[in-house]
């Protein structure tokens, strides 16, 4: 194997490794974004349910309640 062949192979492997590291970093970043979005969705749902329950109780009291 010539030195040029070795250098070319090394360069290809190096660029492949760098690409894979970039893919991994983007995947990790996306994972963090999804976790934040999921937390926001859970909070919105929790607020919606709380508001809905409050509305039910208010409607119930207007109608005569228990």
Image (tube, rainbow, N blue to C red):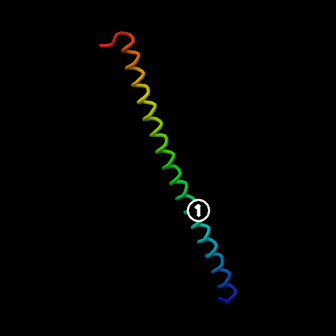
Query: In the structure shown, which secondary structural element does the residue marked by tag 1 occupy?
Result: helix
Q: Position of residue 13 (x, y in %)?
A: 61, 75
Q: Residue at x 44, y 34 (%)?
A: 47
For residue 54, side relative to residue 2 (left or right): left
Q: Quadrant of residue 16?
A: bottom right
Mark 1 surroundings within 10 Å by alpha-carbon count, few (fewer than 14), some (14 through 19), many (20 or more): few
**From this viewpoint, which residue is outermost toward the right?**
4
**From this viewpoint, which residue is outermost toward the bottom?**
2
Q: Which residue is mark 1?
A: 23
Q: Residue at x 48, y 50 (%)?
A: 35
In the figure, 35 relative to 1: above or below? above
Return the residue nearer the eye: 34 or 10: 34
For residue 61, side relative to residue 15 (left or right): left
Specify the quadrant that holds the C terminus. top left
For residue 39, side relative to residue 7 (left or right): left
In the figure, 9 relative to 54: above or below? below
For residue 10, side relative to residue 51 (left or right): right
Q: Position of residue 25 (x, y in %)?
A: 56, 63
Q: Residue at x 65, y 75 (%)?
A: 12
Q: Residue at x 39, y 12 (%)?
A: 62
Q: Position of residue 7 (x, y in %)?
A: 66, 84
Q: Position of residue 49 (x, y in %)?
A: 42, 30
């Amino acid at each position: 194997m010539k030195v040029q062949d070795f250098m070319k192979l090394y360069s290809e492997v190096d660029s492949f490794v760098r690409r894979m590291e970039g893919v991994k970093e983007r995947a990790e970043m996306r994972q963090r974004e999804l976790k934040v979005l999921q937390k926001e969705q859970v909070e919105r749902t929790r607020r919606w349910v709380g508001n809905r329950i409050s509305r039910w109780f208010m409607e119930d009291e207007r109608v005569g309640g228990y």
